[in-house]
Amino acid sequence: MDKLKSLLIFIRSAQHRSFSEAARQLNMSPSAVSRAVSRLEDDLGSRLLQRTTRSLTMTEEGAKFHARCQQILAELEEAETEIKQAQSSPTGTLRLNFSIALGKKYIAPKLPDFAAQYPDLKLEVFFSDRLTDLIESAIDATVRVGMGSDSSLIQQPLATFSLITCATANYLKLAGIPKTPNELANHLCINFIYPQTGKEFTWKFNQDGEEVALSISSYLHFDYAEAILEAGVNNGGIIQAPQYIVAEAIACGKLQPILTNYQSQLSTLIAVLYPQKQYLSAKVRVFVEFMTELMTDLKRAGVVD
């Protein structure tokens, strides 16, 4: 019998001054209750209850022990209540990590509205395009682009996006519009470089029904997607970037899609990931709901698919 149950049996017996009444409340036999109290007394090396044929009375040591036991059980009940409330009402600190471009452009501006819904919740937000160990970094949830989950993480898909090849009308007027991906060799191209490896991004196209990855000869490299967008918008050359990066620039006429007949049919996943736990905390649950609603809005706007 575990110690906590022994304490509860003792408390009930002392309160009702009867093994029989304690047994009735605990759905046990009177003899089992009596044995449990005797074992507890043996473990403590002290008599807690004086037995008579008619009732039980606490000894001086029993009264002191009873007071401490009540305090312990009250604190346990309070802890259980706090945990249950945390499961139903988000409280505490929610630590989040986002991919830089997606996070800064689309998620961060909406976080004040999210926080206003949960006044007992404090947000701590970090931006990084590097892989982050969520458990080691004590991150509650992350929104990542094109990165799979491992066995210690739950991955909740949110949306997908395509890769768009584009440039300004001014650049294309001066340099001409490439008709095939191979003609990009005759153009100024701006490319992304992975911060983790230093390798350049290979551009994706669909040629003759097959997906191909093309190594581009680029004169300018950035490890930050927004910088690629700015260079492209400022007539720096041709870029290939995620749909959510260039959607607004295309919509307002700053960039013009090219090679649309060769656009890759592959989609890249956007997902929220969080450590695998038996119970999903309320703060993570409401964040996942928030991200689902946000991505629904971005789908309507054509920013993601």
Image (cartoon, helix red, strand yellow):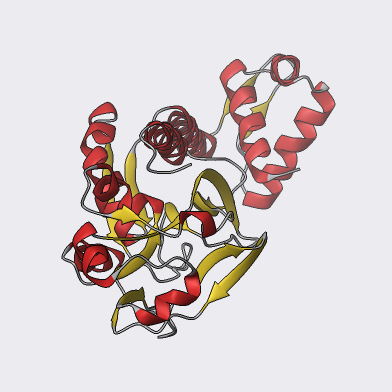
Residue lying at 16% horizontally and 65% vertically, measured from the top left: 234
Q: Give residue 238's quadrant in the image.
A: bottom left
**Residue 55 seen:** yes
Residue 264, position as x, y percentages in the image: 55, 58
Which residue sits at x=41%, y=31%?
293
Tell me if residue 24 comes above or below residue 225 in the rendering: above
Q: How many marks?
A: 0
Quarter holding residue 151? bottom right
Image coordinates of residue 155 in percent, x first then y, are 57, 50
Residue 45 seen: no
User: Against 247, is 121 above or below?
Assistant: above
Q: Nearer the viewer, residue 232 or 268?
A: 232
> Residue 46, how many percent across, how many down?
61, 46
Figure check: 3 above or below 32 = below
Residue 299 percent location from the top left of the image: 43, 36
Which residue occupies the foreground of this view, 286 or 105?
105
> At x 76% / y 30%, what residue is drawn?
34
In this view, the residue in front, 284 or 186, is 186
Q: Residue furthest left?
A: 234
* The N terminus sits in image quarter: top right
Quarter residue 142 falls in: bottom left
155 lies left or right of 123: right
